[in-house]
Amino acid sequence: MHLYDSTIPSGNAYKVQLLLSHLHIPYAITSLNILATPPETRSSDFLAINPNGRIPVFILDDGTPLIESNAIMFYLAEGTPYLPDDKLAKAQVLQWLFFEQYSHEPYVAVWKFRTYWALNGFEDLSGREIQKLKERGQAAIDVMERHLEGREWFVGTNYSIADIALFAYTSAAEQIGFSVGPNVKAWLSRVEGTKGWVKIKKDETGKCPL
Ligand SMILES: N[C@@H](CCC(=O)N[C@@H](CS)C(=O)NCC(=O)O)C(=O)O
């Protein structure tokens, strides 16, 4: 199996790498430079693999490419403790994966990228656009804080790919200026204490201190 990630640490690729670590699955890796002009993710060779021109892409042993971080995790987690068998619990995992992609990642991940790596930082955005990114990212983190009241994990009583999806960028949230409450902080520590947990890879450009 083969993972395409980026030379800079990508939270979306990290989700897949964290799950692969929990599952002890070996894989080969190719890192593409997404800061190049044009990004290596937009080369014709890579677009033939993922027409959407983004990492992560996970190539299965028969050569089938799977795209979208949460779909890749869903595939890998089937039949493992990281995805419940119960119909409702499985749908609740999907509920948080969709929440992560629609209400969290587009704000928190984008804020992280612009903070550390975007050539123009926030300069090409209007004040209103910057405010919207910050407010919506904060709103997502606040939803997590409320959901975690009296709970250890996002779905049921077990750590699942719902937690992995939300951990990827929330782990950087305080560092990049979001306010993170006590329930989320305690949950971040619980995730870090799980068996097989690995840190996101180091940023070789030196721009991101995490
Ligand atoms: N929804 C996608 C988002 C993937 C994504 O935005 N990938 C970024 C890196 S984190 C990327 O490949 N950017 C390069 C580009 O847009 O060319 C997922 O969860 O996999």
Image (tube, grey):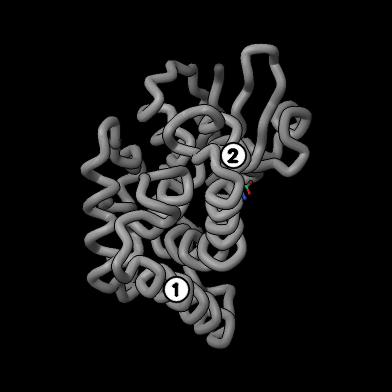
Label 1, ligand 1: CB separation under 8 Å: no
Disc 1 is placed on an element classified as: helix
Question: Position of 195 compared to 120: left or right?
Answer: left
Question: Position of 107 compared to 142: left or right?
Answer: right
* Residue at 29%, 36% in the rendered image: 197
The residue lying furthest to the top in this view is 62
* Residue at 53%, 28% in the rendered image: 79
* Residue at 63%, 19% in the rendered image: 60
Residue closer to the observer: 210 or 178: 178
State whether residue 36 appears in this view.
no
Disc 2 is placed on an element classified as: loop
* Residue at 35%, 66% in the rendered image: 148
Q: Work out whether 138 lies above or below 77.
A: below
Residue wearing tag 2: 55
Instruction: Measure the alpha-carbon separation of dots 2 and 1.
Output: 27 Å
Q: Amino acid at mark 2?
A: Ile
Q: Work out whether 76 lies above or below 41.
A: above
Res. 155 image quadrant: bottom left
Residue wearing tag 1: 143
- The quadrant of the rendering that contains the N terminus is top right
Point out which mark residue 110 bears. Answer: none
Residue 68 x %, y %: 63, 42
State whether residue 112 appears in this view.
yes
Residue 208 x %, y %: 32, 52
Q: Amino acid at mark 1?
A: Val
Label 2, ligand 1: CB separation under 8 Å: yes
Residue 38 x %, y %: 66, 44
Instruction: Count residues near mark 2 (Cα–Cα under 10 Å), then give few for <14, some for 14-19, many for 20+.
Output: many
Residue 120 x %, y %: 51, 65
